[in-house]
Amino acid sequence: MQLYNTLSAKEREGLIEEAGKDRLTISFYKYAHIGNPQIFRNHIFLAWDALEVLGRIYVAHEGINAQLSVPAENFDALKAHLDSITFLENVRLNIAIEQDNKSFLKLKIKVRDKIVADGLNDATFDVTNKGIHVGAEQFNELIEDPNTLLVDMRNHYESEIGHFKNAITPDVDTFRDSLDIIEEQLSEFKEDKKLVMYCTGGIRCEKASAYYKHKGFKQVYQLEGGIIDYTRQVMAKGLENKFMGKNFVFDQRRSERISEDIISNCHQCGQPCDTHVNCANEACHLLFIQCESCAEKMDQCCSAECKEIHALPEEVQKELRKGKSKSNKIFKKGRSEALLYKKTPEESARTIFTSH
Ligand SMILES: [Zn+2]
Ligand SMILES: [Zn+2]
């Protein structure tokens, strides 16, 4: 029985091209009690590998969080398989707005302690006492209400390229940090304001909303299905789109354009730009925003130092990397002093909480 990937990303890329099949990028999550996550993990690996599913999936005692791509022709079979699992029957599938056949190149299903690294001690509050789920239409109404505080539950590099109008976007590196900052900054509004929150696909709000209710916020709402399903509903129902810019996603596509607004700047020259790249220096790999002209000038690197290393022969670079842990910063902090136009958390905190 083969329970793990045997192909490299490169080999997989070749196979996807050769097959020429259209693939769908999908995400879903479900909090549910899973008695033996390892057995469950092996079970879905076998079934999904047979359906040529690729993706990044986390399984824990508390549930499943999945981001994957599947050949369009196998979508129904995958759906049937999900429906055969009691707690995944009719689970909401978030389907990506912009498709890319190479959004994922491996099938990785990992058993973790939690399906979101939220840093919360679940035993201290009732995780089932969640906020009120709202769809796109009600969300649009709620966020126009002057009595509403709209909070983006994502990290700084996500909200930087796209967020809802008037949202508070905490400049944090982790979900845990944002929980504390928001509670501290908004504590005086616990009684009378509506706390409305959103994230990419809804999963982060599931616990955050329960956490804030536990902390004493009386009226807590969360956008069901997150930005991904909001966008789908807006298009399907012809609603007004109140999201500006791009939705950051955690696969090779990096983002989906939701509106034509470009709300961020190149971290090197400051001109309007919302294209995330990874520093071309293998030893750095910093995630940052870079415009085309800076990319050319800097050889797609984040700093002069990285550019220098990147220009060295591959063998010499390998030698330099030896013994050093690879600081793979993709989807991590994305901060560096070399980036002149990236705000520090302190600068952003000032602008965010004084503008409301
Ligand atoms: Zn630039
Ligand atoms: Zn770099």
Image (cartoon, grey):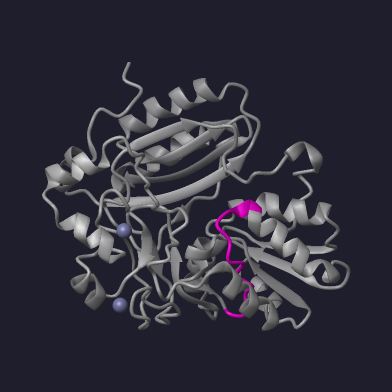
Q: Could you tell me which residue is drawn at 30 percent across and 29 percent down?
A: 5
Looking at the image, can residue 129 be seen?
A: yes
Location of residue 13 by image quarter: top left
- Where residue 338 appears, as percent x and y from the top left, is 37, 67
Taking depth in this image into account, of 142 and 244 the one nearest to the observer is 244
Q: Is residue 145 magenta?
A: no
- Secondary structure mostly seen in magenta is loop
Looking at the image, can residue 133 be seen?
A: no
Q: If the image is split into quadrants, where does the N terminus sit?
A: top left
Q: Could you tell me which residue is drawn at 83 percent across and 55 percent down?
A: 215
What is the span of residues highlighted in magenta in the rendered image?
A: 165-176
Q: Is residue 132 left or right of residue 88?
A: right
Asked if residue 222 is positioned above or below residue 67 in the image, the reply reads below
Q: Is residue 169 magenta?
A: yes
- Where residue 39 appears, as percent x and y from the top left, is 50, 20
Q: Is residue 34 left or right of residue 195?
A: left
- Where residue 64 appears, as percent x and y from the top left, is 55, 38
Q: Residue furthest top?
A: 1
- Where residue 153 appears, as percent x and y from the top left, is 61, 61
Q: Is residue 307 left or right of residue 122?
A: left
Taking depth in this image into account, of 72 and 312 the one nearest to the observer is 312
